[in-house]
Amino acid sequence: MTRYILIKILRSFLTLWIVVTAVFFVLRASGDPIYSVFSLGTPEATLDVFRVKWGIDKSMIEQYFIYVSDIFKGDFGTSFFDGRQAWDIVMERVPKTLLLGGVTFSISVVIGVVLGAIAALKHGTFWDRGIMTAAVAAFSMPSYFLALLLILLFSLQLRWLPTAGASTWQHIILPATTLGLTLAGSIARFTRSAMLEVLRQSYMRTARAKGASRFRQIAWHALPNAAIPTVTVIGFQLGWLIGGSVVIETVFSWPGAGRLFITAVGVRDFAVVQLFILMVASTVITANLLVDILYGYLDPRISVTGDSK
Amino acid sequence: MKRASKETGSTNPTTPRGRLPIRRRSLVKRLGLTGEWLVTAAMIYIAFILFVSVFGFLFQPYPHTQTNLFNQLQPPAFMQGGSWEHILGTDDLGRDVLSRLIKGLQLSVLIGVIGTAIGAVLGSFLGIVAAHFRGWVEEILMMLVDVQVSLPFIIFALAVLAFVGNSLTILIIVVGIDGWERYARLSRSMVLSANQQDYVLAVRSLGLSNTKIYSRHVLPNIMGTLIVQMTINLPGVILLESTLSFLGLGVQPPLTSLGQILGVGRDYLILAPWIAVAPGLVIFFLTLSIAIVGDWLRDRLDPTLK
Amino acid sequence: MSGEAKHTTPAPGATEAEPLFQVRDLSVVFDTPDGTVQVVDSVNLKVSAGRTLGLVGESGSGKSVTCLAALGLLASRGRVTGGKVMFNGRDLLKIDDAEMSKLRGCEVAMVFQDPMVSLNPVRTIGWQISESIFLHQGLSRDAAAKRTIELLDMVGIPNSKSRVLEYPHQFSGGMSQRAMIAMAIACQPKLLIADEPTTALDVTIQAQILELLSDLKKELNMALILITHDLGVIAEAADDVAVMYAGRVVEEAQVLDLFDAPLHHYTLGLLNSLPRVDRKIDRLSAIEGAAPPPQEFVTGCRFEPRCGHCNASCTGTRPEFTDISATHRVACKHPMSVSS
């Protein structure tokens, strides 16, 4: 098990390194960063001063090695725009994103798992069909369109909730609902299919034959088994959640890191964009690693035999 | 219960006499569409959308770029102040919303379909290559899959489009890359298991070339699953393009797509909600319909895919 | 052992007059997408304490379904449409779910075919066995743990103290089936139904499991129903036999009578397909054709399409049982002559 996890961790770092490298070169390939700040007519002498100052006078390979070694020193580069450390710029936005993501994630997991389990237990009934149709509708809905509809209804028509910003607790309701609905929809689907799979296993019949109550069959026999695939899938949804929050933060003017990313991308703020992508990738990779470990913990078939399923 | 007059399912020709009564399958049931009015409706809607995106130009009332500054933000015909000249009203520049919708739909569907095809071909090819060569080729591919999974695709797409610039070609390529890793994983594992099967071993022992083995024997066998996967991915690709365009980094004027119209409509949500709502509903019902049909196809053709 | 017995033992004489477990005219249908099919058609079975009823038939003959239906364990698409299931003077089809839950795993227990998939993969063996005890006997945690180890010893699992903490995947097929049996007898049931308990196991293990079941039956004075498609298993372990074909019982007899003088042509076909050391046959004969799926069941004698001894009278109406002796009866209009 430890060997298995060690290999996983090594692979994670390798993945992260590839992401960092690929992003660095793709972004640099787009042209001289100096022109993202200065207009074309600026005298070369001025440009050269700034090139030296920002370290972009060197060759791309040199820049890359400096960038990577700086990362190990905790230096993620400087924004070309306000001269501040990219780390500071991103980190002041992260708490708001964590707040929105955390609220959304926890609520949708609860709603999704409960609805998915209900659909599976009432398999083939009106409840099942209703919940599943709603789930498909939820994740077929373009999130930005749902956002606009909710704004139209709750903010512009009913005037109940604010549309933009993050100053009061009411501000989180609309963005969290928009993001969460889609997430809950896909979680409900996965939970349902995992649960259906478990419910038709022979050991569920054994539990019934033992005289376990319906509740006991579900809570003590079915759920621990259904949790194994569901946890994996929910873990993978985290990446989706981050991607979605970039859009939603923009629509609702939520002052989080996602909206910062859209702004930074628009003005080609290299350091900020690179750091944001690095952070997103490490978050997703860490989450997948945790899911792997959790998986081994939930499924005794893995934890004992080591690295094979 | 009706008495069965016809045989259903597998039959044993030696026992034609005195069957127990069983209920007979109706035609709708045989097509698998009983109680599946939702699937039927979804199919009709998809057919309609395809028709409009191919032949829409025949019904397009105005050129989608024709502006009329004297007739800005006119409501649709069914709202107060609307007229039948602009059934779905006009936008901020007085352009006909219906015409823009038809034009935008065309491009959205086109990008969605081409993008999905690129992803499917690219991913399946890489998957087959990995399964064929195994070893370090496979290792590299799986590493790339890990990389792709670690970065939410929309973030990658936004960064590339903003930095590298966006022409329609770049947009289609970027959108096309989305989901390649799913096909790659799928085809890799299917080819790995197909290579173990007797029929492949048999044709291999006959000395057929690899190209022929894969194109004539392996690919036809995994095609069904790949097609189902494409149906499942298609809504995602359409949503991705529309999201990018909504954020202003996708389709650029004078071209237009559904997401782009929505992006414009966002600024006029109070004054002219129809600009945003009309394309939004079209996309929503389109992705919903494809998802419903995709689920139905998966259940019927390939229940192993989840 | 008997000191801990919870249930009062029934008077030995009473079991002779009134069997412990009796299925009367039980019919079961399945709702399928193609319509409703009847898979069990007016089946009668009985078994008394201390005896083993072997229920034999090909797969799809309805033998498992009969027993699952009797215990209310049918999958949701199955429905009982008629009949009675008498157990200890009560009709199991009439009691409510809560009462049935109390009964299942306690007075009536079941062992299933494939032990590897019948045990919950994420729970330890010990957890699963002590759950039965916990559910029905309300013992303390320590007492239940102690009893679990006792049970494992009883079914012949070595190193029981360490193995209670292991998971099903660490158990071999034979050991899993022993654990299943331990779970089933945890509350000293009066009736144990073993549904193909040896089918998924190696031949060498099969005999051990059958022996274990027989021993436990004697030790606990249980009634045992042994469902199998294998006449070899019947010969080894059963006292009485009911032969099922296509959802109906076609012949009932004591085990020796059945092997000596089978009356139904289907029974004979089954026997002829069995290799035997006491008879010299050049080759084994198989029954022509295949067992029909439920949607192709005919209304008359269901074996008629495959039977070489039938005539027009066999079609149309269901053959009634003919009593040959007090314990031997057959549902066939042209049975094998008793003399042969």
Image: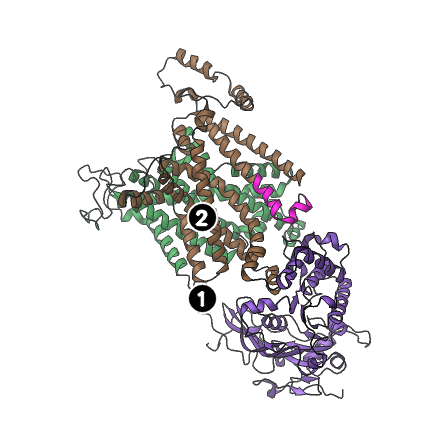
Farthest residue in the top direction?
A: A45
Q: Colour of chain C?
A: purple
Task: Establish if A297 lies above or below C322.
Answer: above
Q: Quadrant of the N terminus of chain C?
A: bottom right
Q: Which percent across, then down, holds residue A4?
A: 65, 39
Q: Judging from the image, what secondary structure is the residue with disc 2 in?
A: helix
Relative to A148, A91 lies left or right: right
Q: Which residue is mark 2?
A: A184
Q: Quadrant of the C terminus of chain C?
A: bottom right
Q: Judging from the image, what secondary structure is the residue with disc 1 in?
A: helix
Chain the render paints green: B
Task: Establish if B237 lies above or below A115.
Answer: above
> Which residue corresponds to the image point at 48% horizontal and 73% vertical from the top-left?
B23
**Tag 2 near tag 1, CB within 8 Å:** no
Q: Is residue B154 visible?
A: no
Q: Residue B39 occupies which quadrant of the picture?
A: bottom left
Q: Which residues are magenta?
A: A289-309
Graded by Cα atoms within 10 Å as few (under 14), some (14 to 19) or many (20 or more), the crowding at tag 1 reads: some
Q: Nearer the viewer, residue B217 or C12?
A: C12
Task: Establish if C338 lies above or below B271.
Answer: below
- Looking at the rendered structure, the kind of residue marked 1 is Lys
Chain the render paints brown: A
> Which residue corresponds to the image point at 30% horizontal and 36% vertical from the top-left?
B254
Query: How is the protein colored in the picture?
Result: by chain
Q: Which percent across, then down, holds residue A132?
A: 44, 55
Q: Which residue is mark 1?
A: B29
The answer to whether tags 2 and 1 share a subunit is: no
Q: Residue B10 occupies which quadrant of the picture?
A: bottom right
Q: Which percent across, then down, holds residue B295?
A: 46, 54
Q: Nearer the viewer, residue A246 or A19?
A: A246
- Looking at the rendered structure, the kind of residue marked 2 is Ala
Q: Residue B91 occupies which quadrant of the picture?
A: top left
